[in-house]
Amino acid sequence: MLFEPGARLDDYVLLQPLGSGGMGEVWLARDNRLGRKVALEVLPSALTRDAGRVARFEQEARAASSLNHPNVCTILALGETPMGSSTSRWSTSSARRSGRDLGARQRGPLIRPRARTVRVLARVAEKPAT
């Protein structure tokens, strides 16, 4: 982990880790300025030294923030936090969503999706040919 619960990053207090991946860690965080909980994605310092990775991170944040769809997470902020004389941390904050993560859904039982597929196929089969 890059941080420990309780660590501060700009206006955010990190509460608990939510996950990690190729681009960094995602934390449940408290936005002290707006007074709400957010998901905060933080790039590791090794990636912040790579201008190409930072540019990709910014590009992805801008692309996601331009979308307005219920199935796309809303980006609330993109920021760079100085962490010392020669380093900084890049992060995005986004609207917090509750529920199971995608990995848990993929590992879980397929009963609901299979049942839904059968219902849809049954409706299609009932339709008269036109």
Image: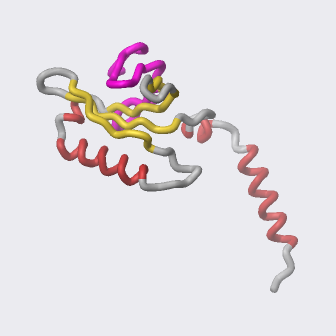
Q: How is the image coloured?
A: secondary structure
Residue depicted at x 42% and y 50%? 65
Quadrant location of the C terminus in the rendered image = bottom right
* Above or below 22: residue 16: above
Image quarter of residue 109: top right
* Above or below 9: residue 6: above
Q: Residue furthest bottom?
A: 130
Where is residue 22? Give x, y as percent.
35, 38
* Above or below 108: residue 70: below
Residue depicted at x 60% and y 33%? 98
Residue 42 or 78: which is nearer the viewer?
A: 78
9 magenta-colored: yes
Residue depicted at x 38% and y 54%? 63
Q: Residue furthest left?
A: 85
Where is residue 4? Give x, y as percent.
38, 15
- Magenta region: 1-27
Where is residue 3? Give x, y as percent.
35, 18
Image quarter of residue 129: bottom right
92 magenta-colored: no
* Above or below 83: residue 65: below
